[in-house]
Image: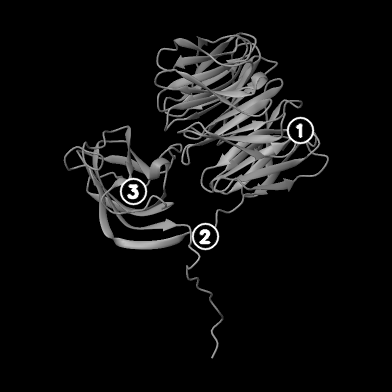
Amino acid sequence: MSTSDNLTVIDGSTYNTNTVPTGNVPNAVAVNAVTNKIYVANWASASVTVVDGATNRTTTVSVGDHPFAAAVNTVTNKIYVANYSSNNVTVIDGATDRTTTASAGSNPFALAVNAATNKIYVADSGSNDVAIIDGTTNLTTMVAAGIYPRAVAIDSFADKIYVVNYDCGNVSVIDGTTNLVTTVATGTYPIAVAVNPITGQAYVTNSGSGTATVIDETTLATTTVVAGSSPTAIDIDLVTNKTYLTNNIWAGTVTMIDGANDSTVAVSLGNDTWPSAIVVNSLTNSVYVGDTVGNSVSIIAGASSGAAQFLPVTPCRVADTRQANGPFGGPYLAGRTSRSFAVPQSDCNIPSSAIAYSLNVTVVPFQGALEYLTIWPTGLPQPVVSTLNSLDGRVKANAAIVPAGAGGAISLYATDSTNVILDINGYFQPPAGSTLQFYPLAPCR
């Protein structure tokens, strides 16, 4: 809470709360789910409060003047803090809390991390630039954006960066490989952006025109969706393909956009609320909305994407890294690396309309133990759970149901070098109109 100098921790199961003291005027929070640490940027005290998620104990790290935004790279365990008045970014080593400094442009306002390329993108509201920081060297490259860039979102899978330019009604789309910039027109006073890497769409809230602009990543074509009064904050449930945005000031509502057809539903939070921040928990299908005026958080049950129909298939081998190199063959999965497989492009005749796969995952470790392997939808953040492990180095297998990711692909990560075999025995898709549904009854003679 920025006026009470503390952080409220909500138990997602019981909604009970704990309060953790911070520095003066906390105004940004970033979480490292791997280390279970929370980083709170304190605007008025030039510091970051580091909270241990297990104990709620805190330590304080000094940063630059007026830290305004924070982001975490969970792969390198580095935390990046944009210092608005110091015109730089503080880099915190998550293991030691030691800091270094990277240069930025004037008045850095927002930043985001591409963990796949280890690059950090900083929107400089004073110089109308984007500072691109190399996460390995901390060296900075400047790229011109529009007038008053104030929000950044990244599609790590496509390596595209979206920068919202508030005063000129457009978005700068940066190619992460070449740094070339393409400008896409939006509504008036765009203020926030979020990306769905699975569907390849970016959503921009236009606070001045009461709309959201939907950008197709491939063509950069746009669609305009009426989104309520002065939409501001935005987040996406990547599992249900639903986008949620707050309607600020007098409206006191949250608008949900269905990614399948761009239809909308408004949820009222009450006339005395001023929803100004929003975040989605895809695991529980819950939406958390911060209320500036009421000093509270509204929790909304997220919209369902509907039941899926399971279609069994004759067991088929999708990939085997023991075979010759290729999209579904070698090389093996080297330790501490990841690899993706586009299941619909395999020889198993799985349609691109599949929304999830029923797989059997087999590992053949090279030598010694395999600490763990994890599998997840391509384009989403790597989860912090194990799908399979082989601590004794033997050949092991496990079943997994995995949602389809970007391009219908799934990704795998292994802590130690191993060959991987993927077999599929069925897939899920939205039910058709002719799908039969079973209705159970109490046994009756």
Which numbered disc, 2 or 3, marks the residue that appears first in the sequence? 2
* In the rendered image, the vertical position of residue 285 relative to residue 182, given as above or below: below
* Dot 2 or dot 1, earlier in sequence: 1
The amino acid marked with disc number 3 is: Pro
| SS class, disc 3 | helix
Residue 58 pos. (x, y %): 60, 26
Q: Quadrant of residue 123?
A: top right
- Marks 2 and 1 sit apart, C-alpha to C-alpha, by 36 Å
**Marks 3 and 2: in contact by CB < 8 Å?**
no
Question: Real-space Cα distance between discs 1 and 3?
Answer: 46 Å
Q: What's under tag 2, amino acid-wise?
A: Ala
Q: In this figure, which residue is indicated by the disc labeled 3? A: 344
Q: Please tell me whether mark 2 sits on a helix, a strand or a loop.
A: loop
Answer with the quarter of the image where residue 310 lies.
bottom left
**Of circles 2 and 3, which is in front?**
3
Q: Nearer the viewer, mark 2 or mark 1?
A: 2
Instruction: Provide residue 127's location: percent of width, then percent of height.
Output: 60, 9
The image quadrant where one finds the C terminus is bottom right
Residue 210, given in percent of the width and then of the height, sits at 71, 34
Asked whether 200 or 339 is in front, the reply is: 200
Give the residue at x 45% y 25%: 77
Q: Determine which residue is flagged by label 1.
A: 292
Q: Quadrant of the N terminus?
A: top right
Q: Based on the displayed image, in which of its 4 quarters is residue 28 positioned?
A: top right
Secondary element at image label 1: loop
Left or right of 229 in this view: 162 = left
